[in-house]
Image (cartoon, rainbow, N blue to C red):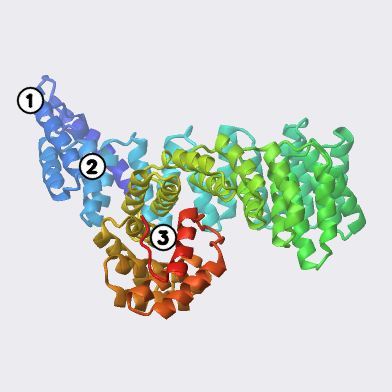
């Protein structure tokens, strides 16, 4: 309806001009002026043009700032300056949308199109508007008009194809696809879409004719002939499919897509032995793309799982495939994932190693191998894997972490200190704050073990900057301060937080008890050291000795002697993370027993 009205408007204007001219001819021979001039043809004076440009740009600026009311007022001023500007009306329509005035938006946009009928994008916007409003008939009408007005543009035709398919207007969809084909040439996508439309129309013969014509258009491209065979197969014509595949393989023996289609043919027709043989043929063919092989292997795994096949059938197939050179690590990765899902960790290790030979930067494979080595305490393997990993992932904190710990567990303190020092230099604002805190915490422990107290305390401070609640850091920091008898108030504050966080941790309870002891609060210290003993502290020589020291200062010499003697019998702590005790401390313990009194350390 709107299109006819617009056409009528275009006709009326010239008629009015002609009427005025005839009237003038009847009275004088002077050339008469037209009764009216189309607004779109009005030329502004330089002054008005400058005003229009200024207010138009300012309106756009306000719209960009989402000041829609201000933008609207400015754009209406632009319309007053130049009522026939399609650009002004177009922008007004968009502002109406932002202001929630849909009817005015549609009216302004249609007026903009009327004034500038050759503007493709205005009509595209109108079509999008109707589509957004779910007014499909109007959307189709606009796109049909555009397709007629802009016969070389593909966009309207593509939109019409989708709209006609959505409304199940399949005959119209085919007609539009034909127009697209005239413009853009025959293609797989268009032919397959026409094939689908013809099937929906129930015209199977025309559907297959369409695919055959595509194959005939490109006779040397076996891909299109394979598509034809697949179309037969998917539409219950297996004999035609088989004949087509065989023709392809006679022309191009070993053509991978046809081999894949033949495997599907054997599977669909229940010829299992031929299907298995075909699978081997494909999977051992170096010309077949890895993606295709992966799809086959995934399907085989799914089938094995659903039919409860023995896993050896799957592993056997993978082993045969992996005997061939691999262009990438995709198939070994799939195999390793299958083995891991079956709990076959030991069998997966050589496959993971193969992955790293193919792709040394494969982080998931390396991390999996690393987890096995850590679990089995194979420290040399941990060092090998992480050292190589840092060549490819120099900013990966986890590899520094495990490399440093492996050296530490091997009592290679200097190497461990070097690794953690390098690791903390990789910490960035994007790093995980908890991991960063742990790095500095371990670095502090290492510095303290090397007798570098200042560096240790600086590292602990850094650890608490990244994670103020790192109780492991607070415990060690507090204990070492208490041993040196410095900053005991700070030590007590930190240690108390650890006890509150883990009230049943014997180590934390011992630290807090010892800080209270060093501050002369012996009765309180005894309460916490007793709790430490009840929570595993009785297996630690240091904790048991501390217990004796505290009982001595509460006046119970007999109990103190019992604990000192028990500590001496236990021997130095050798558990994970235990720091070797200096010989002087062990001698002092024996002196306490001999002299039956507490001897203060240096």
Quadrant containing the C terminus is: bottom left
Q: CA distance from mark 1 to mark 2?
A: 22 Å
The local crowd at label 3, few if under 14, some if 14 to 19, many if 20 or more residues have their Cα within 10 Å, is: some
**Considering only order in the chain, which callout, 3 or 1, is on the residue closer to the N terminus?**
1
Is 257 drawn above or below residue 312 in the view shown? above
Q: Is residue 372 left or right of residue 548?
A: right
Q: Residue at x 41, y 54 (%)?
A: 434
The local crowd at label 2, few if under 14, some if 14 to 19, many if 20 or more residues have their Cα within 10 Å, is: many
Q: Residue at x 71, y 49 (%)?
A: 207
- Which label belongs to residue 472? 3
Is 339 drawn above or below residue 261 in the view shown? below
Q: Residue at x 43, y 53 (%)?
A: 438
Q: Quadrant of residue 86?
A: top left
Q: Position of residue 497 (x, y in %)?
A: 32, 67
Residue tagged 2 = 91
Q: Nearer the viewer, residue 505 or 326?
A: 505
The residue tagged with tag 1: helix, strand or loop? helix
Q: Position of residue 547 (x, y in %)?
A: 42, 73
Q: Position of residue 224 (x, y in %)?
A: 74, 39
Q: Position of residue 260 (x, y in %)?
A: 80, 46
**Res. 479 visible in picture:** yes
**Considering only order in the chain, which callout, 2 or 1, is on the residue closer to the N terminus?**
1
């Amino acid at each position: 309806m709107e299109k006819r009205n617009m056409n009528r408007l275009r006709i009326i204007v010239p008629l009015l001009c002609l009427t005025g001219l005839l009237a003038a001819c009847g009275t004088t021979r002077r050339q008469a002026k037209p009764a009216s001039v189309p607004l779109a043809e009005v030329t502004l004076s330089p002054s008005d043009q400058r005003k229009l440009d200024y207010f138009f740009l300012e309106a756009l600026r306000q719209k960009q700032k989402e000041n829609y009311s201000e933008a609207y007022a400015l754009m209406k001023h632009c319309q007053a300056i130049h009522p026939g500007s399609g650009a002004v009306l177009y922008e007004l329509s968009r502002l109406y949308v932002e202001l929630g005035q849909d009817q005015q938006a549609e009216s302004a946009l249609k007026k903009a199109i009327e004034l500038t009928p050759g503007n493709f994008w205005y009509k595209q916007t109108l079509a999008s508007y109707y589509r957004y409003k779910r007014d499909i008939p109007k959307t189709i009408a606009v796109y049909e008009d555009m397709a007629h007005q802009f016969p070389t543009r593909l966009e309207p035709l593509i939109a019409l194809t989708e709209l006609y398919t959505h409304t199940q207007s399949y005959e119209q969809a085919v007609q539009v696809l034909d127009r697209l084909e005239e413009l853009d040439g025959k293609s797989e996508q268009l032919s397959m879409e026409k094939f689908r439309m013809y099937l929906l129309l129930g015209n199977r013969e025309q559907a297959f004719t369409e695919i055959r014509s595509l194959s005939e258009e490109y006779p040397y491209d076996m891909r299109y002939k394979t598509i034809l065979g697949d179309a037969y197969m998917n539409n219950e014509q297996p004999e035609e499919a088989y004949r087509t595949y065989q023709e392809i393989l006679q022309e191009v023996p070993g053509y991978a897509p046809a081999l894949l289609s033949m495997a599907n043919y054997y599977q669909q027709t229940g010829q299992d032995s031929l299907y298995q043989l075909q699978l081997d043929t494909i999977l051992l063919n170096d010309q077949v793309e890895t993606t295709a092989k992966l799809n086959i292997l995934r399907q085989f795994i799914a089938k094995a799982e659903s039919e409860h096949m023995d896993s050896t059938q799957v592993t056997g197939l993978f082993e045969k495939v992996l005997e061939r050179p691999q262009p990438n690590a995709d198939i070994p990765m799939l195999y390793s994932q299958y083995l891991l899902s079956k709990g076959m960790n030991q069998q997966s290790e050589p496959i993971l190693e193969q992955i790293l030979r193919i792709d040394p930067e494969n982080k998931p494979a390396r991390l999996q191998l690393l987890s096995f080595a850590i679990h089995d305490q194979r420290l040399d393997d941990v060092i090998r894997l992480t050292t190589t990993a840092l060549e490819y992932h120099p900013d990966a904190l986890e590899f520094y972490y495990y490399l440093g710990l492996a050296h530490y567990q091997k009592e290679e303190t200097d190497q461990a200190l070097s690794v953690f020092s390098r690791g903390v230099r990789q910490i960035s604002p994007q790093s995980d704050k908890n991991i960063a805190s742990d790095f500095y915490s371990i670095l502090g422990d290492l510095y303290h073990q090397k007798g570098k107290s200042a560096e240790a305390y600086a590292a602990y401070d850094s650890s608490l900057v990244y994670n103020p609640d790192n109780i492991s850091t607070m415990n060690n920091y507090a204990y070492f301060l208490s041993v040196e008898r410095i900053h005991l108030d700070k030590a007590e504050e930190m240690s108390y937080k650890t006890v509150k966080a883990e009230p049943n941790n014997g180590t934390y309870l011992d630290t807090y008890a010892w800080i209270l002891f060093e501050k002369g609060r012996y009765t309180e210290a005894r309460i916490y050291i007793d709790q430490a003993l009840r929570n595993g502290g009785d297996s630690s020589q240091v904790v048991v000795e501390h217990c004796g020291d505290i009982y001595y200062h509460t006046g119970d010499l007999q109990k103190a002697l019992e604990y000192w003697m028990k500590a001496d019998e236990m021997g130095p702590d050798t558990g994970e993370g235990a720091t070797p005790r200096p010989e002087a401390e062990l001698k002092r313990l024996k002196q306490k027993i001999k002299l039956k009194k507490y001897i203060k350390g240096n």
